[in-house]
């Protein structure tokens, strides 16, 4: 080593040439592994800048028509009241029908349609009970007078 060349030590030029060969081989190996790892195409270069989403705002609340609610409630009450008092139920059914029709003219509403339907059902039920009562009432009274003692 003291400037003397021994036969078992390689020259500096041999060392440099071996190192160059090793670096070129390692560079080639790195390139092949990179090409094997990167099998997906990069689509991000074609993507345009996107605008961030705006803040969420609550949808505008619809104003509920009070006449529609009143008409629907009166229609339901006319159906329930047909068992209690027919005359009051008919008046409630007519009031519910009027309120629902007025509400329907102001603007289309599902409650107004429900009020119209319930009021009509209540009126039909009440009128049929009234007619049956008026027709069958005298016959029933006569039956009770004639056979009432047997019950």
Image (cartoon, helix red, strand yellow):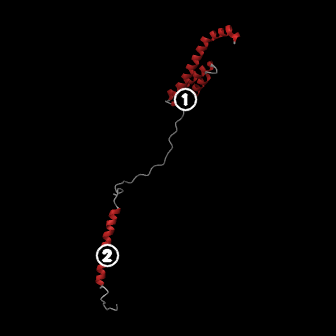
SS label for mark 2: helix
Figure quadrant of residue 142: top right
User: How packed is label 2: few (under 14 Cα within 10 Å), some, or many (20 or more)?
Assistant: few
Q: Residue at x 29, y 76 (%)?
A: 21
Q: Quadrant of residue 13?
A: bottom left
Gap in Å between the C-alphas at discs 1 and 2? 89 Å
Q: Earlier in the sequence, mark 1 or mark 2?
A: 2
- Which numbered disc, 1 or 2, marks the residue closer to the eye? 2
Classify residue 22 as left or right of residue 81.
Answer: left
| Residue at figure coordinates x 53%, y 28% from the top left | 114
Q: Which mark is drawn over residue 148?
A: none
Q: Which sits in the foreground, 98 or 10?
A: 10
Q: Is residue 151 above or below residue 101?
A: above
Which residue is label 1 attached to?
68
- Residue 89 falls left or right of residue 58: right
Is 13 in front, or is 149?
149
- Up-down relation of residue 42 to residue 62 (above or below): below
Q: How many marks?
A: 2
Q: Viewed as shown, does residue 146 lie left or right of 17? A: right
Q: Residue at x 32, y 72 (%)?
A: 26
Can you name the residue that lies furthest to the right here?
A: 149
- Residue 69 on image: x %, y %: 56, 30
Q: Position of residue 132 (x, y in %)?
A: 59, 14
Q: Which residue is mark 2?
A: 22
On the rendered image, what quadrant is the N terminus found in? bottom left
Please state, as top left, top right, bottom left or bottom right, where the C terminus lies in the image.
Answer: top right
As helix, strand or loop, the secondary structure at mark 1 comes to helix
Q: Is residue 22 above or below residue 41?
A: below
Percent across and percent down for residue 91 are 60, 20
Going by the image, does 146 lie left or right of 104?
right
Crowd around label 1: few <14 · some 14–19 · many ≥20 (10 Å): many
Q: Are marks 1 and 2 in contact (CB under 8 Å)?
A: no
């Amino acid at each position: 080593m003291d400037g003397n060349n021994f036969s078992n030590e390689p020259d500096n030029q041999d060392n440099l040439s071996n190192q160059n060969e090793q670096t070129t081989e390692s560079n080639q190996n790195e390139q092949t592994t990179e090409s094997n790892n990167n099998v997906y195409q990069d689509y991000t270069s074609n993507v345009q800048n996107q605008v961030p989403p705006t803040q969420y705002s609550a949808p505008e609340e619809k104003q509920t028509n009070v006449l529609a609610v009143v008409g629907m409630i009166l229609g339901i009450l006319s159906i329930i009241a047909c068992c209690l008092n027919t005359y009051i139920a008919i008046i409630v059914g007519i009031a519910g029908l009027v309120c629902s029709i007025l509400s329907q003219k102001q603007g289309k509403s599902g409650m107004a349609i429900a009020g119209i339907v319930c009021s009509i059902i209540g009126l039909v039920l009440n009128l049929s009970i009234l007619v049956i009562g008026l027709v069958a009432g005298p016959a029933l009274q006569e039956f009770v007078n004639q056979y009432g003692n047997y019950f």
